[in-house]
């Protein structure tokens, strides 16, 4: 089974092509990773690669309750305990590999979290409502930074990348998907600026590429990835020409030497993003969103992807890699435990 064959990700040897997808689980009280996370991640270390849950690069980047940050000494120390446990894991794939997914919620936040309005490229409110520490509320009009203020946002990502190195992570993935801040700058529906960071697709990707360059000052390019979701419409995010927007972004990320592109492979009509991104991104392509044992194997054997990320399957099956190897049936995840805050459905299978 090719899915279970070793793979070389840049200078990193992976024992298989199975990736644990980023999964927000809302157990990090006060933005500090809970000790439960040590077991949550380490018992899944047989994965070829673990991508951490989305981790905010600043206090203002928080968009959901009890999500971890990676910008203070306390948060860094808590993550280091997790990373050390993954690296020390025994059994198949011993000595696991884990990347920190660095994200900023942007407009998908609320002042209830940090006392400041959310920040976004333009004053475009998301659809729906946000759950805050004080209850479910309507989204607020975001603060729009001037061009002169954007370097400070870039530095937030660079600072978190430095914290990730201190915590011992094997690399970082920049969260440019699912309507987060990088995605908000990329897509025309949320970026209505008329300065150097808005307008054309080239200008709209400027912020993302500045973040990439800043993080390259901390990590080798091959240890940096970027995730996108061209087919997603989370909270009403959209683009007038997503194929062009994300094709040109992938070309730029490839030219920057990034190690991998992680594609949430939700369809755009009848077209899957991997179909137009695979030819232009010259390094490792990871796909995710609803893959089964059979569809994942097909993706890698046909060359449509190099690695496949599993979310719900890993939630319900800590021993997913062993079950895939044996051909065992998989337990189904219980949505009631996804964000419930307890050990059940989180620490073990």
Image (cartoon, grey):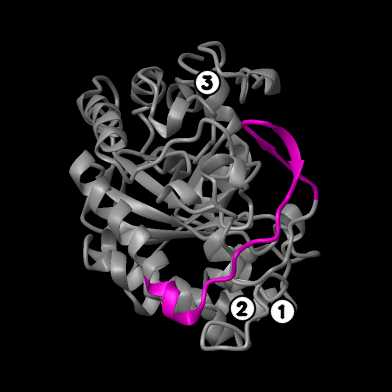
The image quarter containing residue 240 is: bottom right
- Front disc: 1 or 3: 1
- Front disc: 3 or 2: 2
Magenta span covers which residues?
Answer: 128-151
Label 1 belongs to which residue?
241
Label 3 belongs to which residue?
317
Camera-nearest residue between 66 and 245 = 66
Q: Taking 337 as reference, is 62 left or right?
A: left
Q: Residue furthest front?
A: 115
Query: Is disc 2 in contact with disc 1, using a CB cutoff of under 8 Å?
Result: yes
The image quarter containing residue 316 is: top right
What is the x, y in percent for residue 31?
43, 34
121 drawn magenta: no
Regarding mark 1 in the picture, which secondary structure is present there?
Answer: loop
Camera-nearest residue between 294 and 87 = 87
Is residue 36 shown to the viewer in this render?
yes
Residue located 69% across and 69% down the image: 123
Which mark, by number, is residue 271?
Answer: none
For the image shown, how many numbered marks are present on the structure?
A: 3
What is the x, y in percent for residue 238?
73, 67
Mark pair 1, 3: CA separation: 38 Å
145 drawn magenta: yes
Residue 275, placed above or below residue 140: below
What is the x, y in percent for residue 341?
56, 18
Label 2 belongs to which residue?
245
Residue located 62% across and 19% down the image: 340
Mark pair 3, 2: CA separation: 36 Å
Mark with earlier residue (3, 2): 2
Mark with earlier residue (1, 3): 1
Q: Taking 184 as reference, is 161 left or right?
A: left
């Amino acid at each position: 089974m090719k899915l279970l064959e070793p793979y070389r990700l840049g200078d990193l040897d992976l024992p298989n092509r199975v990736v644990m997808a980023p999964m927000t689980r809302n157990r990090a009280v006060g933005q500090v990773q809970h000790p439960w996370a040590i077991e949550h991640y380490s018992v899944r270390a047989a994965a070829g690669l673990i991508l951490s849950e989305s981790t905010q690069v600043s206090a203002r980047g928080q968009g959901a309750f009890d999500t971890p940050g990676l910008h203070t000494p306390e948060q860094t120390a808590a993550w280091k305990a997790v990373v050390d446990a993954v690296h020390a894991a025994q059994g198949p794939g011993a000595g696991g590999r884990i990347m920190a997914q660095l994200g900023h919620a942007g407009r998908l936040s609320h002042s209830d979290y940090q006392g400041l309005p959310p920040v976004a490229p333009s004053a475009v409110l998301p659809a729906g409502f946000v759950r805050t520490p004080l209850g479910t509320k309507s989204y607020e009009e975001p603060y729009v930074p001037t061009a002169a203020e954007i370097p400070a946002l870039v530095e937030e990502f660079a600072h978190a990348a430095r914290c990730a190195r201190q915590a011992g992570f094997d690399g970082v993935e920049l969260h440019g998907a699912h309507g987060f801040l990088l995605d908000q700058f990329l897509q025309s529906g949320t970026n209505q600026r008329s300065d150097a960071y808005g307008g054309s697709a080239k200008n709209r990707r400027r912020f993302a590429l500045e973040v990439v360059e800043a993080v390259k000052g901390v990590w080798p390019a091959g240890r940096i990835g970027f995730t996108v979701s061209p087919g997603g419409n989370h909270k009403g995010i959209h683009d007038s020409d997503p194929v062009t927007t994300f094709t040109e972004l992938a070309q730029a990320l490839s030219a920057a030497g990034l190690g991998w592109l992680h594609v949430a492979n939700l369809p755009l009509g009848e077209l899957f993003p991997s179909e137009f991104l695979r030819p232009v991104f010259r390094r490792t392509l990871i796909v995710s969103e609803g893959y089964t044992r059979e569809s994942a194997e097909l993706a890698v054997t046909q060359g449509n992807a190099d690695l496949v990320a599993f979310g719900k399957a890993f939630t319900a099956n800590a021993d997913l890699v062993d079950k895939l190897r044996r051909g065992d049936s998989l337990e189904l995840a219980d949505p009631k435990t996804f964000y419930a805050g307890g050990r059940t459905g989180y620490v073990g299978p």
